[in-house]
Image (cartoon, helix red, strand yellow):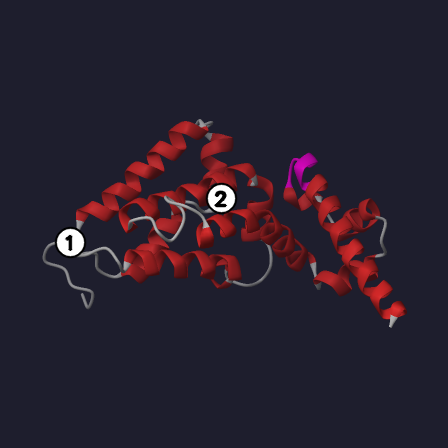
Amino acid sequence: MPERQSSRKDAVRNREAVLAAADALFARRESPEDVTMADVAAAAGVGKGTLFRAFGDRAGLLRALYEARLEPIWQAVETGPPPLGPAAPPHDRVPALLDAVLCFKLDNRRLALALEEGGSGSPYRAEHYKRWHSLLRAVLEQIPGLTDSDFTAHALLAATRADLVEHLAGEERVPRKRMRAQLANFVTGVLTSGPLQGLTAEE
């Protein structure tokens, strides 16, 4: 039993060391593609085999690091006070949720870009995306007169895609404050516009 407990503790320590090493490497490197699994293993002081057993592949490592950074925001979303928490009115909570996503991606530009561009699967099937979409859709459904909350949630999240955030912040040099204001205006416009006249979901 003590040997098994020691093995589990070693696995936890190794995982924490790997995540810390990957975090530091992504913060220093100019391009996410410059960070390899071998780089992370060397920086963490573990073998590549340990890395692959713990995370599966590079995409798995990126997801784990992304989720670790995102966890404080999820805690605020699930149990925190308004405007992020569940007690906030829908018209206030939707803009606050999207602002949180945008700020997170601005603070984690390289990691978010690497995660959304990497791997062979669709980013729309990623667990973190499905979680945000499900939450937004549920909140949007509480707004009277707003139709097709499923598509609206997708459309709003598209405004926070990592490649768009990188383009605006990196290429166009849009200041953070302005980008947040632009997103807030866009979200408010969507929430107050109502359904398009003359069109139905079937058309």
Residue at image coords 51%, 37%: 106
Q: Image check: 69 left or right of 36?
A: left
* Three-letter code, disc 1: Leu
Name which residue lies at 45% across and 55% down: 78
Q: Nearer the viewer, mark 2 or mark 1?
A: 1
> Is the C terminus in the top left, top right, bottom left or bottom right quadrant?
bottom left
Residue at the location (21% across, 56% down)? 146
Residue 11 left/right relative to 78 = right
**Farthest residue toward the left?**
198
Tell me if residue 200 comes above or below residue 43 in the rendering: below
Q: Earlier in the sequence, mark 2 or mark 1?
A: 2
Magenta extent: 26-31
Q: Nearer the viewer, residue 68 or 85?
A: 85
| Residue on which disc 2 sits | 163
Residue type, numbered disc 2: Asp
Please identify the residue farthest to the right as the structure is shown.
3
Q: Is 174 a magenta residue? A: no
**Which corner quadrant of the image does residue 186 belong to?**
top left
Look at the picture and state if 193 lies above or below 177.
Answer: below
Q: Tell me, for residue 196, which label it has, or none.
A: 1
